[in-house]
Image (tube, rainbow, N blue to C red):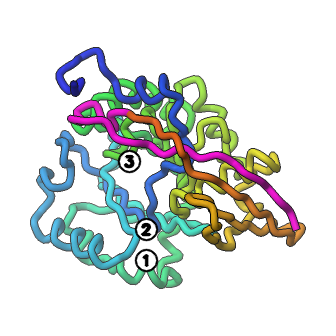
Amino acid sequence: MSPVNNPQFFCSLASAAADEQLFGTASRGEVWFLLEYRPHWEAESFAASTLPAPVKDRITTYLKTIPGSRLHFIKHQRHTDDYLNLFVVLTGEIEPRIYKFPLKTYEDLLSLDLYTLAYNPGGFSEHIYHHPIYLTCTHGKHDKCCAKFGLPVARALGERVGLNAWQASHLGGDRFAANLACFPHGVYYGRVQPEEVETIINHDRQGKIYLEKLRGRVCYNFLTQVGDYYLRRETGILELAAFRYVGNKNLPEKNRWALQFQHLATHQTHTVTVQRGPEVVRNYFTCTALKESNAPQYHLISHEVE
């Protein structure tokens, strides 16, 4: 029976109790539009928003024509600017960047060529934002876990990094709340507790991954995120810039892959072989899901260095 009407059920607690793996679950994205929207967020935040129709149309066109692009609403607990913020984040594996555009009105977005920014950002150097930004999903209308577990983490982030901490609309993975994303590198963390915020921020400022709560890097697909997790676990090398992903190949065994990463300092190739399943974790992926879904689990088969 679905727990949809059970006020005591929280999908994130069920996921944690089932010991569902966090890694390999970060939402993939290469171009992130983070738009400050201060009114209340409905469950379908963009569709239900009061953004002017031409602005909605333009954003929709970007999302349809720019592969790997995503839109999220963001907001602060307190508003200190007399303008609206638009951040565009390019989260490539190499030299990710944040661009900031202050908007007097949402219609100002219509004068920006964000398509060119996505593919040829060289002409936008004056808009580069030289600080990391941190998003916590607090989208309670989308899932009650995001509000219950996200808001305390958002407050802790605000105390630690001030105006570089933002609340965000649905980031994906409600059952991993509280979800925290660090940009520009696009590192996702899940089941974050308020007392872990300082540790995550310190790791991020040092250009490192906090492995214990890692969901993955958004520049990688799910399988590569799994390989990256096991690579970091086996080597103990947490620096984001230490490795470059080379590629992967299917192996004769069912649901088994070999993923290769190059260590830039030594030029050695690390091959991480992983196996999916056969077991899965069955869980309600959201608090309003009508049925359980299968969450694949992965295992490390080997780690070799050449």
Q: Is residue 31 left or right of residue 275?
A: left
Q: Which residue is mark 1?
A: 118
Separation of residues labelled 2 and 3 (CA atoms): 14 Å
Residue that appears at 21% across and 42% down: 41
Question: Could you tell me the amino acid type at mark 2?
Answer: Val
Residue that appears at 67% across and 41% down: 211
Q: Which residue is mark 3?
A: 171
Other residues around mark 2 within 10 Å, as few (<14) / some (14–19) / many (≥20)? many
Q: Which residue is mark 2?
A: 31
Separation of residues labelled 1 and 3 (CA atoms): 20 Å
Is residue 20 shown in magenta? no
Question: Badges 2 and 1: C-beta atoms under 8 Å apart?
Answer: yes
The dot on residue 151 is none
Q: Earlier in the sequence, mark 2 or mark 1?
A: 2
Task: Please state the extent of the stretch shown in magenta in the rendering.
Answer: 283-306
Q: Earlier in the sequence, mark 2 or mark 3?
A: 2
Separation of residues labelled 2 and 1 (CA atoms): 7 Å
Residue that appears at 45% across and 28% down: 155
Q: Is residue 8 left or right of residue 25?
A: left
Residue that appears at 36% across and 38% down: 174
Question: Could you tell me the amino acid type at mark 1?
Answer: Ala
Tell me the quarter of the picture where residue 114 sits.
Answer: bottom left
Q: Nearer the viewer, residue 277 or 88?
A: 277
Question: Badges 1 and 3: C-beta atoms under 8 Å apart?
Answer: no
**Mark 1 or 3, which is nearer the eye?**
3
Residue 95 in sight here? no
Q: Nearer the viewer, residue 5 or 133?
A: 5
Question: Could you tell me the amino acid type at mark 3?
Answer: Leu
Secondary element under disc 1, as helix, strand or loop, is: helix
Tell me the quarter of the picture where residue 68 sits.
Answer: bottom left
